[in-house]
Amino acid sequence: MAVNRGCSLLFAGLLGAMSVGVIAQSSASLTAEQNKLARIEQTLENRLVELEEVENEILGYDYKLERAEKSLADARKHYDESLRELKAAERMQKTSPGADSERALHKAKHAFSMAERGVDSRSRRVEFIQTNYAELQARLNKSQAAVEDAKARQASQSKLVDGMVKSMLVKAEENRKAANAAAAKARMEPKPAAKPVIEQPEIPAPTMASLAPAAESAKSAEASAEEREVDADLLEYVKGEQERLDQLLADTDESEKGKQTFRNLSLRMTNGESLEFEFLGHDQYRLVAPVESGRQTYKINTWKFRRTIPADDDGTRYVFVLDARRLSRPRLVMYPEYVLSRLD
């Protein structure tokens, strides 16, 4: 019986060890999937900001197009009036030639020429706005598709993570019950006279807290920026933002940078530190700073921006670019600095 009791206790111990090992391994997998989910959420946030920007630009072009079309209609009306006046002046010159009619004809020709130019310039402006509007509409369609794709990926990944957590809870509960049953069986068996054995404590039920991945653990600390896998959507996003900024600042010297709107523009970090932005020109401001993982709120002067930072980006340097061309709601662009090395 002493041998049986010893085997039962050993079995209970092995169950407990196996449970810890399985949970540890599953927790590592869960951490990886949660980091993936955080990156998808980060992508969705970026895409939503991008979509808002395009929508606002389209609203601006709606107003521009409306004004341009009205201006063109007025110019055409003026053109028709100038044409009638020109024909009247030509008839007057034929029927009653003289200095006065000649001056009137010269004046009518000049007015008609100016009206003609007005129609031509306004027509070209309408065409220009319509072309830009079509390009914006294409950007809007692409941005909307990107948002929908990110939402679908987020829903799918959330379902996967929830399933993993539930599966881990079920397995841990099964192991706990098996281990407690083995320990209870061992307690019911008579104790050997010579070798008293300390009873095994009952294994507590697993909780969500016990299964929570140690996101701030070794994985985020040991993974180097160069070894991290860069999400294709993040790479595309950063590439697009770099191209936008490069095009906006192309061949800009000191005299063309424009007036700096803010005397001081600072970013308040979660640790209370305040960092100053660098003015690039054309209402663009930039800084690079390390970030903390999790749901973060970044305060820039009086504006607040909420972003998700994946666990494996904890302590990573991020690029912050504030586009302040629209002061009612500036646009914050941010991404890991290490992505820039993948753009080549």
Image: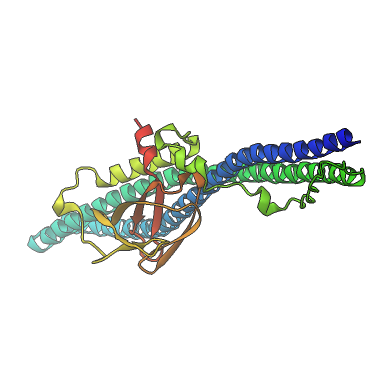
Tell me which residue sits at (46%, 48%) in the image.
Answer: 314
Tell me which residue sits at (59%, 44%) in the image.
Answer: 34
Nearer to the camera, 262 or 187: 187
The image shows residue 111 at horizontal and vertical percentages of 20, 58
Q: Residue furthest front?
A: 194
Q: Is residue 143 visible?
A: no
Q: Quadrant of the C terminus?
A: top left
Tell me which residue sits at (36%, 52%) in the image.
Answer: 320
Nearer to the camera, 219 or 129: 219
When the figure is inspected, residue 123 is found, relative to residue 297, above or below; the finding is: above
The image shows residue 59 at horizontal and vertical percentages of 45, 57
Q: Quadrant of the N terminus?
A: top right
Would residue 76 appear left or right of 263 to someone viewing this image?
right
Q: Residue furthest bottom?
A: 302
Q: Residue furthest left?
A: 99
Would residue 249 appear left or right of 71 to someone viewing this image?
left
Nearer to the camera, 155 or 143: 155
Q: How many marks?
A: 0
Tell me which residue sits at (19%, 43%) in the image.
Answer: 251
When the figure is inspected, residue 186 is found, relative to residue 308, above or below; the finding is: above
The image shows residue 252 at horizontal and vertical percentages of 19, 47
Would residue 170 appear left or right of 24 to someone viewing this image?
right
Q: Is residue 175 visible?
A: yes
The image shows residue 105 at horizontal and vertical percentages of 16, 57
By what rule are the colours in the image chosen?
rainbow
Q: Quadrant of residue 71?
A: bottom left
